[in-house]
Image (cartoon, rainbow, N blue to C red):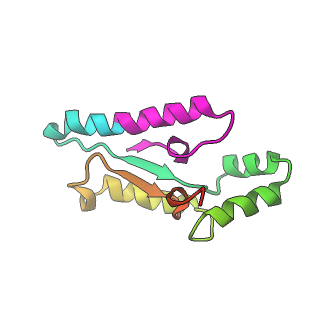
Amino acid sequence: INTITTNAYMNYVGNHAYGASKGGVRELTRSMCLDYGKYGIRVNGLVPGETVTPQWTASIEAAPNPEETKSFLIKKIPMGRFAQPEDVAKGALFLASDESSYVNGHILFVDGGLTAGFYG
C-alpha cells in the first residue's frame, strides 16, 4: 500500500516538487500492479485527505491565520469534517485485508470527498 496524498491530484503554488513526487508514486502503484499481479502481489494506493495529526496541526498553526485556514479547508470537504487517523487506518486495513483480495492497482481516497471538487 503506497501513500500518495491529495497533492498528486491537486496542488498549490510553490509545491511542485512534492506534488510531482506524489504523482510519481501514483503511477508507480499502477505500474507495479501490472508487473506483480501475476505473482499474487497486490499494489494499491491510499490518498488521505486533511487528517488531524500532530504534523497537520503544526502546519495549520504555522499559517498566518490558522482559523481562516481551517475554515477554508473544511468548506472544501463535502463531509464537513477533517479525517481522524482512524479513518485513514480503516482504509489501509481494508486494502491489506482479504476483503480486498481482488483489488489491485486501485487508488483509495480517504478524503471525505475533498478531491472530488476542491476547486468547485
* Residue beneath the point at 81% across and 45% down: 62
- Please state, as top left, top right, bottom left or bottom right, where the C terminus lies in the image: bottom right
- Magenta range is 1-28
Which residue is situated farthest in the right direction here? 64
Q: Position of residue 81 (x, y in %)?
A: 63, 68
Measured as percent of width and height from the top left, residue 41 is found at 22, 41
Residue drawn at 50 percent across, 59 percent down: 116
Q: Residue at x 46, y 36 (%)?
A: 23
Is residue 36 placed above or below 78 in the rendered structure? above
Q: Nearer the viewer, residue 48 or 84?
A: 48
Nearer to us in this view, 87 or 104? 104
In the rendered image, the vertical position of residue 80 relative to residue 58, given as above or below: below
Above or below for 16 versus 61: above
Q: Is residue 62 left or right of residue 90?
A: right
Left or right: where 44 falls relative to 17:
left
Q: Is residue 1 left or right of residue 79?
A: left
| Vertical comparison of 62 with 13: above or below | below
The image quarter containing residue 117 is bottom right
Q: Nearer the viewer, residue 82 or 41?
A: 82
Q: Percent position (x, y) of residue 113?
A: 51, 63
Q: Residue furthest top?
A: 17
Q: How many numbered callouts?
A: 0
